[in-house]
Image: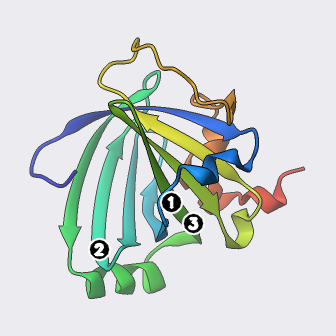
Amino acid sequence: MYGDKARIEIERKFLIRDDSWRREADAGTKVRQGFLAATRGCTVRVRSVAGRGVITVKGATRGISREEYEYEIPLADAEGMLETLCSGILVEKVRYRIPRGDLVWEIDVFEGENRGLVLAEVELDREDRKVDLPPWIGEEVSRDPRYFNAYLSSRPYRSWD
């Protein structure tokens, strides 16, 4: 969502059990993102996705919720920031979408230094919402900061013990 006011992002994140999700997924979209700032209280991310540039400011995570401000920016600006201003490595992934009922699951297949990691995310309208988990969903990692993209930028998955 792009806009001029904050929204609350409520997101659950899971590891993937197997590749059976691929039968339901769309063709996927390449995403490149980097972090201009990442502290415990705030992250500022720039992203190139589907020919568009996006800058996002996220507040501290509380439970599985956090404030989010997101704005479309010129693609050339996003690409320039990715190449010159971001700290850590760029997080590169292909994002697949799977609609199920009134929810949309997003499956991120990471590339580069995070290759081997596959995560599923689902955004919710409230934290206590019941979610029917697809059979390909594995362990929930929503509250594990190692699976946040900002962490993966500074400590890539391939470097974990």
Q: Is residue 14 left or right of residue 70?
A: right
The local crowd at label 1, few if under 14, some if 14 to 19, many if 20 or more residues have their Cα within 10 Å, is many
Mark 2 or mark 3: whose residue is earlier in sequence: 2
The residue furthest right is 161
What label sits on residue 56 in the rendered view? none
Residue type, numbered disc 3: Lys
Is residue 103 or residue 67 the one in the foreground? Answer: 103
> Disc 2 marks which residue?
53
Q: Residue at x 46, y 85 (%)?
A: 83
The local crowd at label 2, few if under 14, some if 14 to 19, many if 20 or more residues have their Cα within 10 Å, is many
Q: Is residue 99 above or below residue 95?
A: above
Whether residues under marks 3 and 1 lie with C-beta atoms below 8 angstroms apart, the answer is yes
x and y, in percent, of residue 134 in the image: 59, 30
Residue 143 occupies quadrant: top right
Residue type, numbered disc 1: Arg
Residue type, numbered disc 2: Gly
> Disc 3 marks which residue?
93
Q: Is residue 74 above or below residue 13?
A: below
x and y, in percent, of residue 142 in the image: 57, 30
Is residue 69 or residue 86 the one in the foreground? Answer: 69
Whether residues under marks 1 and 2 lie with C-beta atoms below 8 angstroms apart, the answer is no
Q: Which label lies toward us, 2 or 3?
A: 3
> Disc 1 marks which residue?
95
How many angstroms separate mark 1 from mark 2 (CA)? Answer: 16 Å
How many angstroms separate mark 2 from mark 3 (CA)? Answer: 15 Å
